[in-house]
Amino acid sequence: MKRVLISTLGSQGDLLPFIALAQKFASHGHEPILYTNPIFRECVEAAGISLVPVGTVEQFTSTLALADANATQNPLRAFRPIAAELSARCRDFYQAMRKDVVAKQSIAIGSTFMFALRLLRETHQVPCATVHLQPMVFRSNERPPRHTAASSWLGQLTPFGQLTPRFVTRALW
């Protein structure tokens, strides 16, 4: 049996695939522990998965509000508050996860921007895997994802927007 430390920070759309992974690990006799914002407590616990809350509901909602406000004013700045939140929460995730490490019996899995699990690999030799489940991290020349729900024609004209000619997007990649 392995202890599976699973971490993600994002919306419910980011969380749900990790819940499914946790349930699969549990069905094979492993012990999954999910680290995420406490706003998702009910959803995680309803799935029968152990939750370790990281951050606060207020931090989560204020980051989303700031990202949406930035997207409305300037879509090119929408990701900044999200990146700042990821950076600020890295230490919190790392400290929460390292408390649950069982030497030679733990593995860590996290979303693309979850750097804490890479720190666990370096400091505690915990094998880790980055799992790319969020559409925002997939490269697409045809239909690039949006970082926020706010829609703006300017966002479509950015270098990776849907209206940018495909040859330009390919050259930028």
Image (spheres, grey):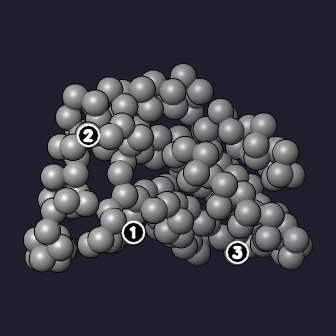
Residue at 39% in and 69% down: 138
Q: Position of residue 99 (x, y in %)?
A: 67, 50
Crowding around mark 2 (Cα neighbors within 10 Å: few <14, some 14 to 19, many 20+) is few
Disc nearer the start of the sequence (3/1): 3
> Mark 1 or 2, which is nearer the eye?
2
Disc nearer the start of the sequence (1/2): 1
Answer with the quarter of the image where residue 102 lies.
Answer: bottom right
State the mark number for residue 4.
none
Q: Position of residue 10 (x, y in %)?
A: 52, 46
Q: Position of residue 26 (x, y in %)?
A: 84, 67
The residue beneath circle 3 is 104
Residue at 28% in and 30% down: 72
Crowding around mark 1 (Cα neighbors within 10 Å: few <14, some 14 to 19, many 20+) is few
> Mark 3 or 1, which is nearer the eye?
1
Residue at 56% in and 53% down: 14
Q: Is residue 143 left or right of residue 128?
A: left
Q: How far is mark 3 from mark 2, CA to CA?
A: 49 Å
The residue beneath circle 2 is 152
Quadrant (top left/top right/bottom left/bottom right) for the C terminus: bottom left
Secondary-structure class at tag 1: loop
Secondary-structure class at tag 3: loop
Q: How far is mark 1 from mark 2, CA to CA?
A: 21 Å
Q: Position of residue 25 (x, y in %)?
A: 79, 70
Instruction: Identify whether 146 is placed above or below 22.
Output: above
State the mark number for residue 138.
1
Disc 3 residue type (three-letter): Lys
